[in-house]
């Protein structure tokens, strides 16, 4: 099983950028699809973006399309989330997750079986 640790969260103003990192330990990280989810206070965890094990397939939620970019460096066992043009509604705890995924399951949190502890992103207006 892979262990995940997120970093890079913080407090920024609307319009600013942040880059989150998800560092993985354990074997065969390059075999795992990886996703980012977020959860705002009082709301359910929601899908943000995901990337296949090879990096060849990427999914984005409509709410972040054109502003967020997911990428991965399998040599460094790390997945990144570049967030640009941040909005107050992006405020949430962001979680990295990994699993053996097929196309129909990337958006489903229950398909992932390894989760990080989360990193807080706060966007002020």
Image: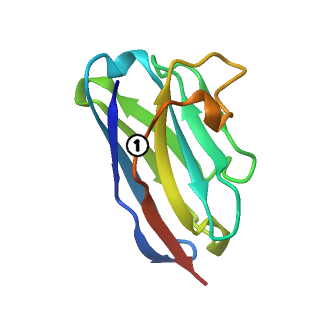
User: In the rendered image of this protein, does residue 105 appear above or below residue 37?
Assistant: above
Corner quadrant of residue 8: bottom left
Question: Which residue is tagged 1?
Answer: 80
Percent coordinates x, y for residue 106 in the rendering:
64, 28
User: In the rendered image of this protein, does residue 41 appear above or below residue 52?
Assistant: below
The crowding category of the residue bearing disc 1, from other C-alpha atoms within 10 Å (few below 14, some 14 to 19, many at least 20), is many
Q: Residue at position x 45%, y 66% from top?
A: 120
Q: Which residue is outermost to the bottom?
A: 125
Q: Name the side, left or right, on which 7 lies relative to 104.
A: left
Q: Name the side, left or right, on which 29 lies relative to 68.
A: left
Comparing 78 with 113, the one in front is 113
Corner quadrant of residue 49: top right
Please identify the quadrant where the C terminus is shown: bottom right
Q: Residue at position x 58%, y 19% from top?
A: 101
Percent coordinates x, y for residue 110 in the rendering:
63, 33
Q: Residue at position x 28%, y 30% from top?
A: 77
Disc 1 secondary structure class: strand
Q: Name the side, left or right, on which 2 lies relative to 35.
A: left
Quick check: can you spot residue 42?
A: yes
Comparing 80 with 4, the one in front is 4
Percent coordinates x, y for residue 92 in the rendering:
56, 65
Exactly how many numbered labels are in the figure? Answer: 1
Quick check: can you spot residue 83?
A: no
Q: Residue at position x 58%, y 54% from top?
A: 38
């Amino acid at each position: 099983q892979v262990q995940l640790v997120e970093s890079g969260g913080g407090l920024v103003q609307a319009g600013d950028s942040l880059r989150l990192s998800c560092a993985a330990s354990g074997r065969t990280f390059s075999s795992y699809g990886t996703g980012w989810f977020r959860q705002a206070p009082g709301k359910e965890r929601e899908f943000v973006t995901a990337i296949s094990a090879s990096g060849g397939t990427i999914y984005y939620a409509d709410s972040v399309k054109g502003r967020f970019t997911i990428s991965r460096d399998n040599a460094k066992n790390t997945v990144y989330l570049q967030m640009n043009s941040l909005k107050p509604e992006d405020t949430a705890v962001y979680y990295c997750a990994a699993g053996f995924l097929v196309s129909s399951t990337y958006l489903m949190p229950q398909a992932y079986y390894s989760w990080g502890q989360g990193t807080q992103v706060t966007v002020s207006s």
